Amino acid sequence: MAPFDVRLDEQADYEQAKHVVQPDISVICDKSKIGNQGCDDPPDLAVEVLSSSTALKDRNDKYKLYEQLGVKEYWIVDPLHRTVEVYGRVEKGYEKRSVFGEGDVLVSFLFADLTVSLAGIFQNIEGEG
């Protein structure tokens, strides 16, 4: 379903929620979090793909929001520089786990068995001009 709303606060009324976002990709392991209007709690993993119009918001606003409200892992995909930054939750917020490049195999901080070969991911993407 696209767009897929993710409600990041505890408001009982969906319409009153202050923090509703639409990550480019969400991984939600607990099916009970998914309702008719999207996800009712932070996803386990949120992925944002940067563009010139969203980069500042994804790197600052969404980063802080995801960190504060309990998203366990956050990936920032940068098509222009052909990198993926992986942030993992630690006691007091996020820690940058690694930056993976075009030829690397991304390893998830949260999901030990999740690896993504980036070799083909950026292959047909042209930089923004």
Image: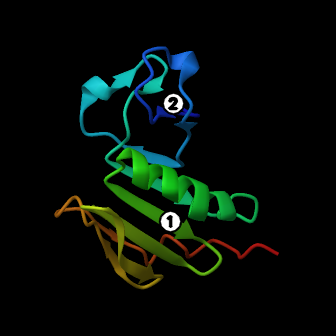
The residue tagged with tag 1: helix, strand or loop? strand
Instruction: List x then y, in percent, for residue 104.
Output: 37, 83
Return the disc, 1 or 2, that comes first in the chain's sequence: 2
The quarter of the displayed image where residue 2 is located: top right
> What label sits on residue 128 in the rendered view?
none
How many residues crowd around disc 2 within 10 Å: few (fewer than 14), some, or many (20 or more)? few
Q: Is residue 72 left or right of residue 123?
A: left
- Tell me where residue 94 appears, x and y as whole percent: 36, 65
Image quadrant where residue 34 sits: top left
Could you tell me which residue is drawn at 31 percent across and 64 percent down?
Answer: 88
Q: Amino acid at mark 1?
A: Ile
Secondary structure type for disc 2: loop
Percent x, y for residue 123?
56, 76
Q: What amino acid is found at the position of numbered circle 2 in the picture? A: Met
Labels in figure, total: 2
Q: Position of residue 89 (x, y in %)?
A: 30, 61
The label number, if any, that marks residue 76 in the structure image: 1
Residue at 57% x, 17% y is: 15
User: Label 2, on which residue?
Assistant: 1
Q: Nearer the viewer, residue 109 or 120?
A: 109
